[in-house]
Image (cartoon, grey):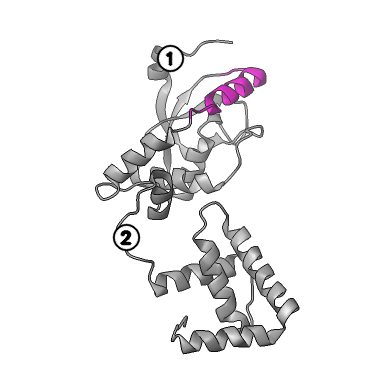
């Protein structure tokens, strides 16, 4: 397998039309994962700080195929980029292309303690690809942050329900919303899991306690003057 050195990178680094680059069908990385949103935010804030590594292909629609940087290319497409920065490895075999994808995808994870210190140092100074809650979990340091506003939470709640096509009966709204709020603080679970778990908790409550339990909950919330509207 040909070694690609620094001189090759310099010589074959260029800006091309983003529509000339296609994805490969063998990349084992999970597509549009939770981590992808961080990649997309990084590209939005910083642009492409690293080139997309490609090979040349014989195709009627594309000139290049991605070997490394699929998520960065996806982010650039989602963000409406017209041009993209690539390093072209030339015409290489399928076997070599697949091998390079595997080698390039291997990454060294952050030391969580050192990462936490950096995040706490930078949190109020620059834009970071982590939420305040994530920074607190990683660093173990409680940040002085404003709680999410009722309007922000309402938007997030409604958008999540809409994205999963969930319809909530009016009489179940407050109970389900409270379950959603509790689960939403857990950074380790996805929106899909939050919705499914909240609905399951609602169904279990109705099954074991009947609708009276839901009404009791609503009455208690009214007494506490909690308004989710």
Along the viewing direction, whichever of 14 and 60 lies nearer the viewer: 14
Q: Which mark is residue 8?
A: 1
Which range is magenta? 91-108
Q: Secondary structure at mark 2?
A: loop
**Residue 169, position in %: x, y?**
64, 82
Q: Secondary structure at mark 1?
A: helix
Task: Tell me if residue 176 comes above or below residue 73 in the rendering.
Answer: below
Can you say whether 31 is above or below 52 in the image?
A: below
Q: Which of the two residues, 4 or 193, is positioned nearer the viewer here?
A: 193
Residue 48 visible within the image: no
Tell me what residue is drawn at x 55 percent, y 10 percent. 2
Q: Is residue 196 magenta?
A: no
**Residue furthest to the right:** 207
Q: Which of the pair 203/129 is nearer the observer?
A: 203
The image quadrant of residue 58 is top right
Q: Main secondary structure of the magenta part?
A: helix
Which residue lies at the image location 53% right of the left edge and 86% below the top edge?
Answer: 220
Name the image quarter holding the N terminus: top right
Q: Mark 2 packing: few (<14 Cα in 10 Å), some, or many (20+)?
A: few
How far separated are the C-alphas under marks 1 and 2?
Answer: 47 Å
**Horizontal and vertical percent for residue 160?**
55, 66
Q: Which is nearer the N-term, disc 1 or disc 2? A: 1
For residue 60, side relative to residue 152 (left or right): right
Reading the image, the residue beneath label 2 is 145
């Amino acid at each position: 397998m040909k070694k690609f050195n620094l001189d090759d990178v310099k010589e074959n680094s260029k800006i091309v039309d983003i529509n000339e680059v296609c994805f490969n069908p063998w990349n084992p990385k999970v597509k549009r994962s939770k981590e992808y949103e961080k990649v997309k935010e990084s590209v939005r804030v910083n642009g492409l700080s690293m080139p997309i590594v490609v090979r040349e292909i014989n195709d009627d629609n594309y000139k290049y195929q991605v070997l490394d940087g699929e998520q960065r290319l996806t982010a650039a497409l989602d963000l409406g980029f017209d041009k993209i920065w690539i390093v072209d490895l030339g015409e290489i075999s399928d076997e070599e292309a697949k091998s390079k994808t595997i080698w390039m995808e291997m990454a060294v994870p952050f030391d969580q303690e050192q990462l936490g210190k950096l995040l706490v140092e930078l949190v109020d100074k620059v834009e970071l690809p982590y939420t305040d809650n994530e920074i607190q979990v990683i660093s173990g340091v409680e940040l002085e942050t404003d709680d999410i506003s009722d309007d922000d939470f309402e938007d997030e709640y409604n958008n999540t329900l809409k994205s999963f096509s969930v319809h909530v009966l009016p009489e179940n709204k407050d109970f389900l919303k409270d379950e959603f709020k509790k689960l939403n603080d857990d950074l380790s679970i996805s929106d899909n899991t939050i919705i499914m778990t909240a609905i399951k908790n609602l169904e279990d409550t109705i099954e074991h306690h009947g609708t009276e339990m839901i009404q009791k909950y609503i009455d208690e919330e009214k007494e506490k003057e909690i308004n989710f509207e």
